[in-house]
Image (tube, grey):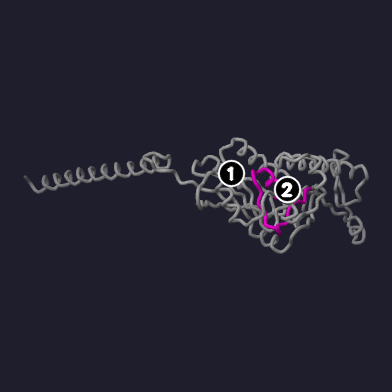
Amino acid sequence: MTRTEEKRLFRRKSMLIGGCYFLLFSGLFFSFVYVIALKGSGEFGWQPREKVALIRVEGVIVDSREVIKALRRYQKDSDIKAILLRVDSPGGAVAPSQEIYDTLKEIQSEGKKKIVTSMGTVAASGGYYIASATDMIVANPGTLTGSIGVIMELTNLEGLMQKIGIEGVTIKSGKNKDVGSPFRKMKSEERAILQNVLDDVHSQFIEAVAEGRSLEIDAVRKLADGRIFSGRQAKKLGLVDELGSLEAAIQLAAELGGIAGKPEVVETENKTPFLQLLQGRFIGGWNTPRLPALSIGMHYLFSF
């Protein structure tokens, strides 16, 4: 056998041995994955890991996508036996709050997972709106909550513009297209239009709280004048179920989900750092909108 033939034979043996090792390790790898999958499903007498999912809703509610995304993910996860919302929000826009509320009610209606709300420093207005869709609400005694109302704030700059010699020009195709314009005083009929819209959204808020909390609409309406309550006051009024910390709420969620002992917690955060800073500086209310802005209950420094 020549040297060249020996090299070829050596390469073939090396490739054969390498292929055998590849098949061996591939088989071991896929066997490992398969066993892990069986473990997660409860085969071989192993129990799946039962967890509580913690979703933080912090800052002004201006977008529902991240919260709903997290809710949908945990809705499908068989390891998650209960979902805990940690709400630390003064409220926000109407539509995102309603979208989160509807998603929570859908998950709740399935009956597969319990949902609990833990209230932080403030869980008012839109923050309370979404909390009312959960099975249980736990607040700290000093939590600020409630604020069941709707607000729209506009600015009239007509007098200032006249003083500095600026004239606002509006071209429109419908007589009410510029309702809320900052360039002129609002007419009485325009105010009536906006008031009618706010009254309708306010009614939606009241109906949602009454449904979520299993309360009479008239009972909620008496509390729905925009006032805030402490956590202790809210419990006496039936707006909150229990008083306690985040840890207490986690344990309650675990018990409702059928988890024995201290649960494993999987956490998802949803917060905007800048708005978090503002929220830490102010308890509740501001709004100077550039355009007519509708928010549930409390108002803020910026419009979105």
Q: Circle 2 — which element?
A: loop
Q: Which residue is mark 2?
A: 239
**Residue 148, visible in the rendered structure:** yes
Q: Is 293 placed left or right of 39 in the picture? A: right
Q: Which residues are magenta?
A: 126-148
* Residue found at the very far top of the displayed protein: 110
Work out whether residue 284 or residue 159 is closer to the camera in this orientation and state it.
284
* Residue found at the very far left of the displayed protein: 1
Q: Position of residue 51 (x, y in %)?
A: 51, 48
Callout 2 environment at 10 Å: few (<14), some (14 to 19), or many (20+)?
Answer: many
The quarter of the rendered structure image containing the N terminus is top left
3D distance between C-alphas at marks 1 and 2: 23 Å
Instruction: Tell me which corner region of the image, top left, top right, bottom left or bottom right, holds residue 74.
Output: top right
Q: Position of residue 93 (x, y in %)?
A: 73, 48
Residue 139 in the magenta stretch? The answer is yes
Q: Circle 1 — which element?
A: helix
Q: Is 298 placed left or right of 265 in the picture? A: right
Amino acid at the residue labelled 1:
Leu
Work out whether residue 132 or residue 97 is closer to the camera in this orientation and state it.
132
Amino acid at the residue labelled 2:
Leu
Instruction: Tell me which corner region of the image, top left, top right, bottom left or bottom right, holds residue 24.
Output: top left
Work out whether residue 188 or residue 150 is closer to the camera in this orientation and state it.
150
The disc, 1 or 2, on the residue closer to the chain's N-terminal end is: 1
Residue 128 in the magenta stretch? The answer is yes
Q: Which residue is mark 1?
A: 71
